[in-house]
Amino acid sequence: MDREINGNIQLKVPEIKYTKLFINGRFLDSVSGKTFETNDPRTGDVIAAVAEGDKEDVDNAVKAAREAFDHGKWPRTSGHERGRILMKLADLIEQHAEELSMLDAINAGKLLHMTQAFDIPTAAFMLRYFAGWADKVHGQTLKCSGEFQAYTLLEPVGVVGLIIPWNFPTVLFVAKIAPALAAGCSVVVKPAEQTPLSALYCAQLAKQAGVPDGVLNVVTGFGPTAGAAVASHMDVDAVSFTGSTEIGKVVMAAAASSNLKQVSLELGGKSPLGEICLAGSRVYVQEEIYEEFKKKTVEMVKNWVLGDPFDPQVHQGPQVDKRQFEKVLRYIEAGKREGATLINGGKPVGEKGYFIEPTIFADVKEDMLIAKDEIFGPVMSIMKFKTIEEAIEKANNTRYGLAAGIVTKDLNIANMVSRSIRAGTIWINCYMVTEGDAPFGGYKMSGFGKDSGLQAIHKYLNVKSVITPLYGSPW
Ligand code: ADP
């Protein structure tokens, strides 16, 4: 544990090339000239000063996106051509995998070997997946009543605002832009204030790939200023948000009270997992194996190495920033106060940076804060159940419905559980597997609208019915 933290090791810092707003194909300072600091969560030190966009910058970005949509070639070019450019962007992302994975590791504290093995390949995959749909989504011919015939056209919704969080900076940037661009929309992206760097890097690659100026804009800055300006903008036709349930409500209210823009929300989760596995924040374990499971889990995390996410031997890096670090520690205190049994971890590690021990609570009850709220940190709650019916009821006893997992050898139980849990993704005998063509998004207060799969491209397409008489005009 903590062998690498705050020792004398030389921390690797990648070169930071892009720190300005990306509007209409150019990197620009913010109108106010203000910048904000982005930090290295390993140490809390400043990595770079990044342009702080606000309402006027969002106005400029939306103007560019509007012009590109209303008069530019992107929505008017063939789906095939858009797909070709998105394929090229996928190639460029792969060619720059090292820089991008380092930017996510240094900005979000993500493990470098994970960003290399998962995040960057997933981003490239997503682009190719949606590039493939660009010339294959189309309307239908309708039969109508006999006097008339009709067909539907699928048309891009227009200018789309995309607001994203810090946990998968490159993946979410790409997963949001790919279906919107494939559909022919132009976009204004507001990356998380904690992790602006890889989005700016990808924006430059998109230009290189041939995405026309104005079609993809990135405004870095804070949520209540830049983010709110996107959500409430009168000239933005749709907003797709990933983040907390709390801010999801704010975004939806802003969308409703401005121009009724279309909204899709991918929000928090409190995903239950039955029986055995480390991932998942609520783990329900059958009574007979409860004690054994606890023992094995603790043994397993004893070998868990906390440290520099650039070190391939490390299992767990730091929390993304001070606010998140303090929030996780507050939840750990709440767990102790409410009477859960702390069986591993529970403390911060090191003098600098935002490291927290892998923390495991047993004897967790449904009404405890650690069982109800999304913590977004290395805190796991273990709970006991007797019957499958009880496990299902407890698993569903949450306001969230993002995902759930079941571990079983019994096919009937797997079938029953996967149909009974109200969540957008169910993993059977696996966990955290995401696939480009598997729609991803929540039930209940985890939001609505899907971020991958064919459904994602339909979020960015309006359906138009065109009706015409079959045998001449009736009038
Ligand atoms: P997290 O708790 O995971 O950081 P948030 O929901 O706070 O999630 O943030 C997700 C994204 O939403 C970030 O890009 C953030 O800047 C943005 N955001 C925060 N507040 C607002 C707001 N009032 N309006 C629009 N976007 C916001």
Image (cartoon, grey):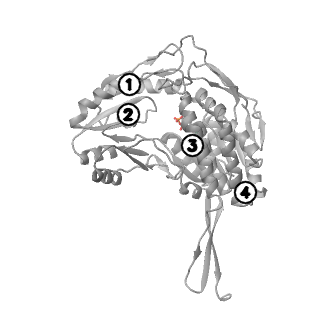
Between 245 and 460, the residue placed more toward the observer is 460
Q: Residues within 10 Å of mark 4 (few under 14, many from 20)?
A: some
Looking at the rendered structure, the secondary structure element under dot 4 is helix
Mark 4: which amino acid? Glu
Q: Which residue lies at the image location 53% right of the left edge and 54% below the top edge?
A: 453
Mark 4 near mark 2, Cβ–Cβ under 8 Å?
A: no
Residue at numbered disc 3: 122
Rounded to the nearest whole Å, what is the CA distance between mark 3 and mark 2?
22 Å
Q: What x and y, as percent, mark residue 125?
A: 59, 46
Residue 369 spot, x, y in % from top left: 36, 33
How many numbered callouts? 4
Q: Which tag, 1 or 4, sits closer to the chain's start?
A: 4
Label for residue 81?
4
Residue at mark 1: 301
Apparent side of residue 251 relative to residue 303 in the rendered image (left or right): right
Q: Quadrant of ligand 1?
A: top right
Q: Are marks 2 and 1 in contact (CB under 8 Å)?
A: yes
Quadrant of res 320 = top right
Mark 3 to mark 1 CA distance (whole Å):
27 Å
- Crowding at dot 2, Cα within 10 Å, few <14 / some 14-19 / many 20+, comes out as some
- Give the class, few, some or many, for how many residues have Cα within 10 Å of label 3's Cα (few <14, many ≥20): many
Q: Which of the marked residues, 3 or 4, is nearer the chain's N terminus?
A: 4
Question: Label for residue 278?
Answer: 2
The quarter of the picture where the C terminus appears is bottom right
Indicate which disc, 4 or 2, sits on the residue closer to the N terminus: 4
The one of 5 and 458 positioned closer to us in this rendering? 5
Residue kind at label 2, given as amino acid type: Leu
Q: Is residue 174 left or right of residue 295?
A: right
User: Callout 1 environment at 10 Å: few (<14), some (14 to 19), or many (20+)?
Assistant: some
- State which tag comes first along the sequence, 3 or 1: 3
